[in-house]
């Protein structure tokens, strides 16, 4: 097996789950016009066991309208989760360049979302959304995350192709740093796909310990080394997300990490607070 050349750019090793961040670090975006949140579209749907199925066909989402009667087309999807009333956290690469963002809740509500703050270096974005999006997920304050801890991811990979509801995967903390010792990331073994970006990484107490952000490009690594890596994925550390949120006026719910739940139990904690995000242009 050939070693990975040190000169190979980090971006070349990351699969499209992560878009390389822009040069700017942290930016406070302009406030929403008039100081009000965008209006929710449509009447609330009745609670259901799972979100309604996505429209059939090659285009898994319904586009919105824009001036001149032209329909906006969905170009990508991701995941976000509730961190405060009316506020969602996701990856910046999920929201970047979108003419419109839509958030679909576990109750089937389809709500407009708007970026209000971003940190491109951490690849995090804070979104404002009108309407009831669910209870905030608690962030773990201690003890320190350890190698080998069990973790759960919850999100919407390959939306429109897989289940119309959320997908749960399990794994472990493989390493306490990311690609080439990136101190802002955990390496995790829980499988993730395109669309998991921005979803919560939870411990077995149902506490947020990270934000799913990237996966290793297995084909690229195989071309370079002759070996196909398995289950090498990454999440922004919860401490990084907490600092970003607190700098932008958000006071997340905090809780000690205490294991004892099954993965199914953790999924029930995450389900009402995790949303499908659609990027339209």
Image (cartoon, grey):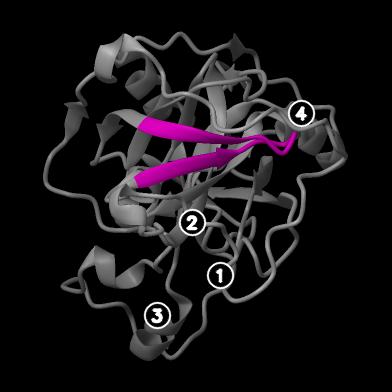
The crowd level at tag 2 (other Cα within 10 Å; few <14, some 14-19, many 20+) is some
Image-based side of 101 in relation to 144, left or right = left
For marks 4 and 1, the one nearer the N-term is 1
Residue 56 picture quarter: bottom right
Q: Is 87 above or below relative to 95?
A: above
**Residue bearing the label numbered 3:** 221
Q: Is 169 above or below relative to 90?
A: below
The crowd level at tag 1 (other Cα within 10 Å; few <14, some 14-19, many 20+) is few
Q: Of discs 2 and 4, which sits in the foreground?
A: 2
For marks 3 and 2, the one nearer the N-term is 2
| Label 1 element class | loop
**Label placed on residue 63:** 2
Are dots 1 and 2 in contact, CB under 8 Å?
yes
Distance of label 3 from label 2 (alpha carbons): 36 Å
The quarter of the picture where the C terminus appears is bottom left
**Label placed on residue 269:** 4
Q: Is 207 above or below relative to 22?
A: above
Image-based side of 273 in relation to 20, left or right = right
Q: Of discs 3 and 1, which sits in the foreground?
A: 1
**Residue bearing the label numbered 1:** 59
For marks 4 and 3, the one nearer the N-term is 3
Q: Which residues are magenta?
A: 100-114
Distance of label 2 from label 4 (alpha carbons): 30 Å
Image-based side of 210 in relation to 42, left or right = left
The crowd level at tag 4 (other Cα within 10 Å; few <14, some 14-19, many 20+) is some
Q: Of discs 4 and 3, which sits in the foreground?
A: 4
For marks 2 and 4, the one nearer the N-term is 2
Picture residue at 23% right of the left edge, 41% below the top = 121
């Amino acid at each position: 097996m050939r070693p990975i050349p040190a000169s190979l750019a980090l971006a070349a090793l990351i699969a499209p789950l992560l878009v390389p961040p822009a040069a700017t670090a942290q930016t406070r975006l302009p406030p929403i016009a008039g100081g009000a949140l965008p209006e929710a579209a449509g009447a609330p749907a009745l609670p259901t066991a799972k979100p309604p199925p996505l429209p059939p066909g090659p285009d898994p989402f319904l586009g919105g309208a824009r001036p001149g009667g032209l329909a906006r087309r969905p170009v990508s999807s991701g995941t976000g989760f509730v961190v405060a009333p009316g506020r969602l956290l996701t990856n910046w690469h999920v929201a970047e360049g979108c003419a419109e963002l839509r958030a679909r809740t576990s109750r089937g509500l389809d709500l407009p979302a708007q970026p209000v703050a971003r940190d491109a270096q951490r690849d995090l974005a804070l979104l404002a959304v009108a309407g009831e999006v669910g209870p905030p997920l608690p962030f773990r304050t201690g003890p320190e995350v350890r190698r080998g801890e069990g973790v759960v991811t919850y999100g919407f990979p390959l939306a429109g192709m897989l289940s119309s509801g959320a997908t749960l995967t399990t794994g472990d903390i493989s390493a306490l740093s990311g690609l080439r010792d990136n101190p802002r990331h955990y390496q995790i073994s829980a499988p993730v796909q395109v669309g998991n970006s921005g979803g919560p990484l939870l411990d077995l107490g149902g506490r947020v310990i990270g934000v799913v952000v990237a996966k290793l490009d297995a084909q690229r690594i195989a071309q370079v080394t002759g070996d196909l890596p398995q289950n090498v994925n990454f999440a922004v550390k919860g401490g990084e997300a907490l600092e970003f949120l607190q700098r932008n006026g958000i006071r997340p719910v905090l809780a000690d990490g205490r294991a004892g739940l099954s993965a199914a139990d953790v999924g029930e904690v995450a389900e009402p607070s995790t949303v499908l995000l659609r990027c339209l242009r």
